[in-house]
Amino acid sequence: MREDDIVLEGIDIHKSFQTGAETLHVLKGVDIGIRRGEIVSVVGASGVGKSTLLHILGALDRPTKGKVRLDSTDVFALSDKKLAHFRNKTIGFVFQFHHLLPEFSALENVMMPQLIAGEEKSLIKEKAEHILSEVGLADRAHHKPGELSGGEQQRVAVARALINEPQIVIADEPSGNLDRATGEELHDLISALNQEKGQTFIIATHNQLLAQRAHRIITLVEGKAMPSSKEKLKAQEK
């Protein structure tokens, strides 16, 4: 892995939580590098820290120890205010539960990150309409989340993640709340966005089919990150 290929890097990441009198060490020195333009899946048993790791890599949570670099920026050296601005501009998020705002249309939900950033509304609307078209929802732009299927809602969430043209999209169990067929459609969309736009993704998933479609698989085991070959994934999960 050439250093200039890496868009996101986690260095010696530790995360501990205090539970009463005990300290729970979830991440114990994770090192991870994500190349520009690749899809990386993070797998592992439930409770091993996949979501915790993604929240730290996405600067939603600070590590107990360690660094995260996005391009040349040491993200946790930023103040909270600067970090929030940096995160909104450079990282897109897709979660298991779409977290769409129910009172707003699909189009308005997609526009929201750029509205928060203070961009020109007419330009944001045009861009959001284009992205909704790219994810196959041009005819659903003015529907509210409650009028959309689960798969459509998650596509809106993907479009919202893309509106700021992020360096990386972080997805935490993106198809975990979808049936198999709808999940496969979402996986197809992620692959297409990667192939056609060069979009970088890091995805935490229990879904073996989605994990297998990644360029690389990283397994979390006892608080450490271990590279995995796709062929060995089934054996590791047994």
Image: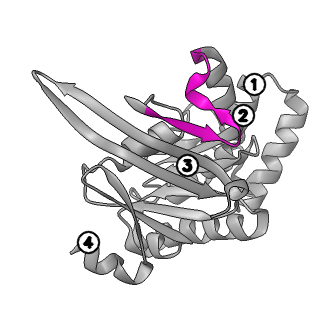
Which amino acid type is marked by label 1? Ala
Q: Position of residue 218 (x, y in %)?
A: 43, 63
- Provide the residue designation for mark 1: 117
Residue in front for this viewpoint, 103 or 93: 93
User: Which label's residue is closer to the chain start, 4 or 2?
Assistant: 2
Colour style of the rendered protein structure = one colour
Badge 4 vs badge 1, beta-carbon distance below 8 Å: no
Rendered residue at 57%/47% (across/down): 9
Rendered residue at 43%/42% (across/down): 12
Label 2 – label 1 distance at C-alpha: 8 Å
Number of other residues with Cα within 10 Å of mark 3, as a class: few under 14, some 14 to 19, many 20 or more: many
Decide: is 159 above or below 210: above
Q: Position of residue 126 (x, y in %)?
A: 87, 43
Residue numbers of the magenta segment? 66-80
**Dot 4: what SS?**
helix
Number of other residues with Cα within 10 Å of mark 1, as a class: few under 14, some 14 to 19, many 20 or more: few
Residue in front for this viewpoint, 209 or 31: 31
Of circles 1 and 3, the one toward us is: 3
Label 1 – label 3 distance at C-alpha: 19 Å
Badge 3 vs badge 4, beta-carbon distance below 8 Å: no
